[in-house]
Image (cartoon, rainbow, N blue to C red):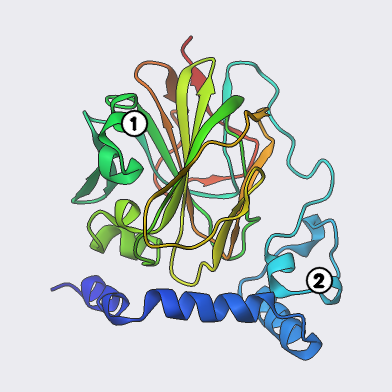
Amino acid sequence: MSVDQLKTLPQYMLPQHALSRFVGKLAASKTPWLKDTFIRRFAARYQVDMSEAAQPDLSQYACFNDFFTRPLKAGARPIDSHVDSIVSPADGAVSQLGPITGDQIFQAKGHSYSLSALLASETDAKAFENGHFATIYLSPRDYHRVHMPFAGTLTKSVYVPGDLFSVNTRTAENVPNLFARNERLVAHFDTELGPMAVILVGAMIVASIETVWGGLEPIGKIIRITQPEAITLSKGDEMGRFLLGSTAIILFGKNVVAWQNHLSAGSAVTMGTVIGKTKK
């Protein structure tokens, strides 16, 4: 067993959900001394750039969650306006991106996982076989709102219960089927390019996932499918946010997009910048 595997092993033993929900309660606390200490230490530890925030004063946030999901100043993340562009849904780094091989998505060296497991549906998976995927990892210091990579109309939202492993590089390289085993929310959209899915993947210490159409997603133990009233979002519109950070995965069908050649695992991206182009 490698050193990285040994370092990952404790995650299997931790009470992942209980720990995450406990931290979630602390993050929602409005007790001044507690939230101020939490925010200050976090900002210093992860060198959070507050110069881009609409509210740069740490003391003005009502709770840690408000700080973590802070909005940015107007114009801080311009959205590429070219009609053929696919933009990054979030600030962060590319975990992986490329073609989907049959129904297999590449996770990290030695690991792939299936579309049907990720989407919790063999039927939904068919639309993305041999398509394209991009996985964006949001680090603790990043802006944690997730935006539309391309314009689309929401067709359904699927909550999938699961584990809460960390989603950093070490864990991705050592925990099989990581993104298909963690708790997640799958948002399905109809677009000019056909179906598009944006998956918000939960992780260790991620207290909750929130969407603009449904608010805070209730935690549960069974798959939950909702079909909200038709909501159409433009490229760059906010679609959701993480209350403590994680990963966003984008899926497109076959032969409809091409990812930018300069992007690879580890490439830094910011929300609204071009990560791909349409082929249609």
**Three-letter amino acid code at disc 2?**
Tyr
**Height in image: 206 above or below 216?**
below
Q: What element carries label 2?
A: loop
Identify the mark at residue 124; answer none if there is no mark: 1
Q: Work out which residue is located at the far bottom of the displayed protein and give it.
A: 33
Instruction: Residue at 38% x, 58% y: name it.
Output: 161
Instruction: Residue at 44% x, 70% y: name it.
Output: 204
Q: Is any atom of residue 135 visible in this view?
A: yes
**Height in image: 274 above or below 182?**
above
Q: Where is residue 92 in the image (x, y as percent from the top left)?
A: 55, 51
Labels 1, 2: front one? 1
Instruction: State the CA–CA distance, disc 1 to disc 2.
Output: 40 Å
Q: Where is residue 249 in the image (x, y as percent from the top left)?
A: 44, 43
Q: Which of 34 and 212 is in front in this view?
A: 212
CA neighbours of label 1 inside 10 A, class few (<14), some (14 to 19), many (20+): some
Quick one: label 1 or label 2, which is nearer the N terminus? Answer: 2
Q: In this view, does 246 lie to the left or right of 180?
A: right
Q: Where is residue 213 in the image (x, y as percent from the top left)?
A: 65, 42
**Height in image: 251 above or below 162?**
above
- Residue that label 2 marks: 61
